[in-house]
Image: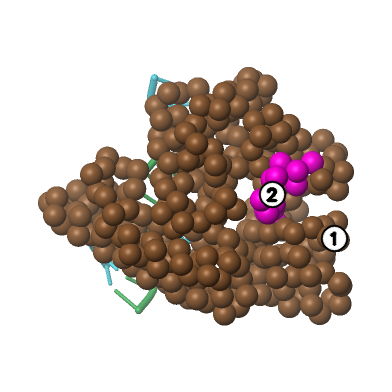
Chain colours: A brown, B green, C cyan
Amino acid sequence: MIRLGYACISMATKNNPNKKTTLGQLQKLDRAGQRKKLRSILQSNFFNLMEVLEYNRQHDIFLYRLPSEFVPFATHPIAQDWDWEREFRWDFDKAGDYIRTHKMRITSHPGHYSILNTPHPEVLEATIKDFDYHARVLDQLGLDADSVMVTHVGGVYGDKRASLERFAENYRKLPAAIKNRLVVENDDTSFTMRDVLELCESIQAPMVLDIHHHNCINDGEAIEEYLPRIFRTWGDRTPKIHFSSPKSDRDFRSHADDIDVEDFLRFARLLTGNRIDIMLECKNKDFALLKLRSEVLESGETISLG
DNA sequence: TCGTGTCAAGATCTT
DNA sequence: AAGATCTTGACACGA
């Protein structure tokens, strides 16, 4: 059974849970005004989240990535004493109930400026703060261990081995609340499927395989030979994979607007028998998902899509 | 209403 | 050492 999902933005609902403001705007306001603005943005984001979740349910979409901007300025000093968890208790419960009732899987993806293997202590501190925020949102929603947050290994800093080792060291020191949710994804420039798999096995964290990234950088490994090991890193959690098609041969790393159904089928055939969630990463978001799903149906292939 | 400058971050490459 | 680039949608604001 393969479940498809999309990241952050629904093209159908248009209103998405990613409303934000800028620091400059906030700084023009007094303390009370700042609080009011932050509160109103988060309230909109909860409203939009419910709208997106309901839309997802109507379209049998059970996998969705929550935007990192969900709580505005959550990790910024300007909102340090804002207790959004307490203030929005009711909303977290409501959204969490909906997600659990409909057995949805909500994940998140801290921004690419949060880097666990950084050699700079202040960057590491900011990264942990950001991971902590992402974990808190999933915790407040009362979601289970399948609600992971995805990160990349980070920079190479001229020494790939040492940088992988620093990731492992920093990972081990993380608080349990973060470790329980953090999973690692292969990237498209530095850390390959094999690098990340070996890392994940050694730190005992799940690995998100990104097929497109693997196609961007690899040492000729065949995916199918590694899938069982990758799935094993998930233990009894449901494995998650990222999938997208390249924009063009010339601009290979970029994501295409939609998913190429032939690409997808070629990969999906490797998955028979496995329970898998596949996050599609492309510009057309939910529209691309629905399009792919109908194309897979038309193809007549016996692939069980959820 | 529309177009555009701005934002937010760290690594890496360029100068 | 400083600056550009990557990436990216949407805010904020002036036309």
Image quadrant in which the C terminus of chain A is located: bottom right
- The subunit letter for the residue under badge 2 reads A
Q: Chain of mark 1?
A: A
Task: Residue at 79%, 41% (x, y): give it.
Answer: A229
Place of residue A120 in the rendered image (x, y in percent of width and height, measured from the top left):
45, 23
Residue A163 drawn above or below residue A188: above
Q: Nearer the viewer, residue A150 or A161?
A: A150
Residue A81, image x, y percentages: 23, 44
- The amino acid marked with disc number 1 is Thr
Mark 1 to mark 2 CA distance (whole Å): 18 Å
Asked whether the viewer can see residue A214, the reply is no
Amino acid, disc 2:
Asp
Residue A241 shown left or right of residue A218 in the figure = left
Q: Is residue A212 depicted above or below A163 in this figure? A: below
Q: Nearer the viewer, residue A183 or A113?
A: A183
Q: Quadrant of residue A151?
A: top right
Label 1, secondary structure: give it: loop
Tell whether position A236 is magenta. yes
Q: Is residue A299 left or right of residue A247?
A: right
How many discs mark residues in the rendered view?
2
Q: How far from the left and from the top, in percent, is residue A85?
A: 32, 53
Percent position (x, y) of residue A11?
Answer: 52, 72
Q: Residues within 10 Å of mark 2 (few under 14, many from 20)?
A: few
Residue visible at 51% across and 56% down in the picture: A143
Picture residue at 75% right of the left edge, 59% below the top: A275
- Nearer the observer, disc 1 or disc 2? 2
Residue beneath disc 2: A236
Q: Which residues are magenta?
A: A229-244
Q: Quadrant of the N terminus of chain A?
A: bottom right
Disc 1 target residue: A272
